[in-house]
Amino acid sequence: MEKPYVVGVDVGGTNTVVGIVDKRGQILISGSIKTSKHPEVEDYLNELTALINDLISQTTTKDQIKGIGAGTPNGNYFTGSIEFAPNLNWKGVIPFAQMLEDRVGIPVALTNDANAAAIGEMTYGAARGMKDFIVITLGTGVGSGIVVNGQLVYGHDGFAGELGHVIMRRHNGRLCGCGRAGCLEAYTSATGVARTAREYLELRPEVQTRLRNIPIDEITSKDVFDAAMAGDEMAKEIFRFTGEMLGEAFADFVSFSSPEAIILFGGLSKAGDLIMNPIRESMEKNLLNIFKNKVKLMFSELKESDAAVLGASALGWEVK
């Protein structure tokens, strides 16, 4: 008989969240540990193993778990390794899936966090029944998971689909965390929105805005969102700029894989129409004629707090 449960592990730069998930995508129980407090990966994995064992013991038994799926920064599905993740304490190549499997005794599959989000949407969310779509994660960075003909695109080495690192500004572009300049992520991530706010404040000292009430180095994307919701014109303009750039990029992405939908996921998608309207307008304006009015723009249907765990857990059904 098919084992009824899987474990989803979402490894973030700050926290790691673990959930036990059933076939319907219900998270039966979840818990978390601090990723960032462990300079050594072995100590982290020992704490993670203890949490997984504890959650299993509270809900079921190990022989009822089909597999563990993990979504991690720079996770390589082919090798099961985390490779050179800039936002984690552990450097180099970490054979994460094998190390966790050795400790827990349950097969582990791993992919990067944006791919996990795409698998989650396909299994439990807005992309159920779709064969061709792209998930864009708008958080601290900009990630993407590309599905073509029902298959996630991994490329020959496991790292395909880094759409956050297409270069949007070839000349005098902003420095990106990846070390290059002008990447989409440098403008349209949550950190990119805060950078835009700082630039606008410095370039337009004459403009009155609520954002001047916050120390300039402490402004976050949430501050910009709150100001925009209160009707602040500069904050609304920052979202327009961000949405327009995303729309330009999406028009190019559509030319590559002709998706049925582009699904937005992550913190910035909470801005709703503030970000969606300029994206839609800019994308349609820049699309090749044959693609116009064909591509749905949607928000994720998965609750943000659950989506990464659900996406990772969907990999657990695939383990051999």
Image (spheres, grey):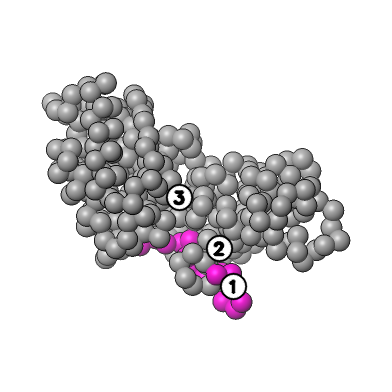
Q: Are marks 1 and 3 in contact (CB under 8 Å)?
A: no
Spatial CA span between label 1 and label 3: 25 Å
User: Residue at (33%, 32%) from the top-left corner?
Assistant: 19
Where's residue 251, x and y in %?
55, 62
SS at mark 2 in the image: helix
Q: Nearer the viewer, residue 287 or 277?
A: 277
Which label's residue is closer to the chain start, 1 or 3? Answer: 3
SS at mark 1 in the image: loop
Task: Single out the mark in the foreground, 1 or 3.
Answer: 1
Q: Amino acid at mark 3?
A: Val
Q: Which mark is residue 186?
A: 2
Q: Which mark is residue 173?
A: 1
Task: Single out the mark in the foreground, 3 or 2.
Answer: 2
Spatial CA span between label 2 and label 1: 9 Å
Q: Which residue is mark 3?
A: 135
Q: Which mark is residue 65?
A: none
Where's residue 260, x and y in %?
46, 50
**Is residue 276 at all visible to an observer of this figure?**
yes
Q: Residue furthest bottom?
A: 171
Residue 164 shown in magenta: yes
Residue 256 shown in magenta: no
Q: Amino acid at mark 2?
A: Ala
Q: Amino acid at mark 1?
A: Gly
Where's residue 101, x and y in %?
17, 43
Q: Nearer the viewer, residue 37 or 250?
A: 37
Range of the magenta residues? 158-175
Q: Nearer the viewer, residue 179 or 170?
A: 179
